Image: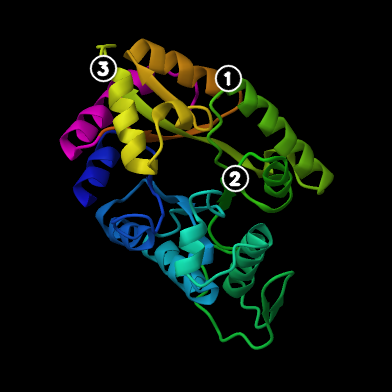
């Protein structure tokens, strides 16, 4: 995995992202990013998305501040509250109630920022601490940027009001445009500037010049990743697959809708296939995108 990330940096990618779940074996994302902080030099290191409820919040603040230091300020933290119908067991084994999960998430982020700035007490709607120990300050004043993953009306309002970036995965570029407008409206209502929130997109990508068997490959990937068929997942997540020209054109529609950073998850089962796709995206898709920066 470290070699994969190093190769991505060599190919010109701007960022590398680690996801988070307790449902199945994987390298824990903060451990992964800590390893990448010394193996890479330039790329942003991000979570997509971290699930803070499954970690003690004060310890998580220290871990994130540590990665921010180790990477010399290259960390971006996207957070989420999990998925209904899927994350209930994660809350149960973490001994955290699922109720008020959005309030808990926002409180956790506010607590992190308080700890990074040296505050010694915190009182939110869910979390309360009267006597916080001195914590590791972040590398950057105010801490690493914190993005929110989600596109519900509540998530859009909270993104504009509280967060530094937005990383949704809507299956239609038109929905992305509408959501981004709502985020910017919420930011303005909160007295923030329109560009206070970085607009990004989380998208699953598979380049294939052979249409036969493509849906079967996507279905296998979705079943392995979510335990759900492709036909179900495609209705709630951005999945772009097919010939390179089609993939580039579709991603370009998201860029025109306002997405400035494309976080591409490769829908391939093996590391060799993922490396092949990584190179195709860098050498074929990225040059075709009509956006000034980031993939």
Q: Which residue is mark 2?
A: 165
Q: Which residue is mark 1?
A: 256
Residue 253 image offset from top left, x and y in percent: 53, 17
* Location of residue 36 by image quarter: bottom left
Side of 266 relative to 110 (left or right):
left
Numbered disc in front, either 1 or 3? 3
Frontmost residue, 196 versus 47: 47
Label 3's element? Answer: loop
Classify 10 Å Cα crowding around label 2: few (below 14), some (14-19), many (20 and above).
many
| Inter-mark Cα distance, 1 to 2 | 18 Å
Frontmost residue, 152 versus 96: 96
Q: State the residue at coordinates (80%, 41%).
A: 188
Q: Can you say whether 245 is above or below 14 in the image?
A: above
Tell me the magenta residue range.
Answer: 269-294
Frontmost residue, 265 versus 135: 265
Labels 1 and 3 touching (C-beta < 8 A):
no
Query: Considering only order in the chain, which callout, 3 or 2, is on the residue closer to the N terminus?
Result: 2
Side of 123 relative to 209 (left or right):
right
């Amino acid at each position: 995995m470290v070699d994969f990330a190093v190769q991505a940096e060599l190919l010109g990618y701007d960022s590398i992202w680690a996801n988070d779940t307790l449902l199945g074996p994987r390298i824990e994302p903060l451990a992964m990013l800590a390893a990448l902080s010394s193996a890479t030099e330039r790329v942003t290191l991000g979570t997509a998305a971290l699930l803070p409820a499954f970690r003690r919040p004060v310890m998580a603040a220290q871990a994130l501040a540590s990665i921010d230091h180790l990477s010399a300020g290259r960390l971006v933290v996207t957070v989420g509250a999990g998925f209904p119908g899927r994350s209930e067991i994660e809350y149960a084994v973490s001994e955290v109630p699922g109720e008020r999960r959005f309030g808990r998430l926002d409180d956790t982020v506010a607590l992190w920022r308080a700890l990074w700035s040296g505050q010694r007490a915190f009182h939110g709607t869910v979390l309360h601490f009267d006597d916080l120990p001195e914590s590791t300050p972040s590398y950057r004043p105010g801490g690493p940027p914190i993005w929110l993953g989600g596109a519900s009306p509540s998530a859009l309002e909270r993104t504009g009001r509280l967060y530094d970036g937005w990383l949704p995965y809507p299956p239609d570029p038109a929905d992305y445009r509408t959501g981004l407008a709502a985020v910017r409206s919420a930011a303005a209502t909160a007295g923030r500037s329109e560009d206070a929130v970085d607009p990004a997109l989380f998208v699953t990508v598979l380049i294939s010049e052979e249409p036969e068997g493509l849906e079967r490959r996507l279905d296998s990937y979705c079943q392995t990743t979510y335990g759900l068929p492709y036909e179900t997942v495609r209705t709630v997540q951005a999945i772009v697959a097919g010939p390179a020209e089609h993939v580039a054109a579709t991603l370009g529609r998201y860029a025109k809708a306002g997405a400035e950073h494309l976080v591409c998850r490769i829908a391939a089962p093996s590391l060799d296939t993922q490396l092949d796709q990584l190179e195709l995206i860098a050498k074929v898709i990225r040059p075709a995108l009509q956006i000034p920066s980031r993939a």
